[in-house]
Image (cartoon, grey):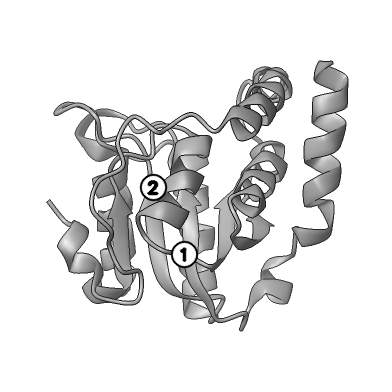
Amino acid sequence: MLCVCNTVVMGGAEAYILTAEEAAGLDADCVMVLGARVYDKGVLSPVLKDRVSVGIGLYFAGAGRKLLMTGDHGQIHYDEVNGMKVAALESGVPAEDLFLDHAGFSTYESMVRAKEVFGVQKMVVVTQSFHLSRAVWLARKMGIDAYGVPSDLRTYKNQWYNELREFCARGKDWLYELFRPAPRYLGDPIDIGGSGEVTFD
């Protein structure tokens, strides 16, 4: 069953995965950068640092009008999105073009919230290759015209573990998409076409 789910998810996303050059100028509603581990004091892990770097580059290349940083900020002492915010602002992204989704606790929840909270209709998703198919497939299943750009800028530790975990996660999210459980937190609508400063804490 897991093999079937993986085939469906990867096959369904394949045509929508682009290079950074192909995505430039798409003028989507936003470029979404998916969260990953941060260390003490908001230091980005190599995986997240590369996602943010590629996402910022795509924003400046016209792939999306806004940047949507989505990740886990469910605890006072663990905060993925504000570390991403600092990196984007230091790179010259205007505050009004930078949106934070503090309740992107999973890839599935990030995609549901992109559609239901932020009203995204078209976006470019940034994450590493092992994760990208699932992210794009989920976004498109949510009714978003989604495209993916990989952010593999180096060789990462525990790549075998990432691949194994992703193999199982594709099966889990195939079921999530089938049954559509509500995310842990939804909240009031936020217009992705407005100012992202309303999402800052």
Residue 60 is situated, as x and y percent measured from the top left of the image, at 47, 78
Would residue 103 be seen by someone viewing this image from the given angle?
A: yes
Residue found at x 86% / y 21%: 3
In the image, 161 versus 155, the foreground residue is: 161
- For residue 169, what is the image quadrant? top right
Q: Is residue 40 above or below residue 51?
A: above
Q: Is residue 150 above or below residue 123?
A: above
Q: Is residue 197 left or right of residue 155?
A: left
Mark 2 and mark 1 lie on one chain; the one further toward the N terminus is 2
Residue found at x 42% / y 36%: 45
- For residue 26, what is the image quadrant? bottom right
Q: Is residue 36 left or right of residue 38?
A: right
Pointer 1 residue: 120
The Cα atoms of the two marked residues, 2 and 1, are separated by: 13 Å
Residue 31 is situated, as x and y percent measured from the top left of the image, at 49, 65
Q: Which mark is residue 70?
A: 2
* Residue sticking out furthest to the front: 179
Residue 158 is situated, as x and y percent measured from the top left of the image, at 63, 20
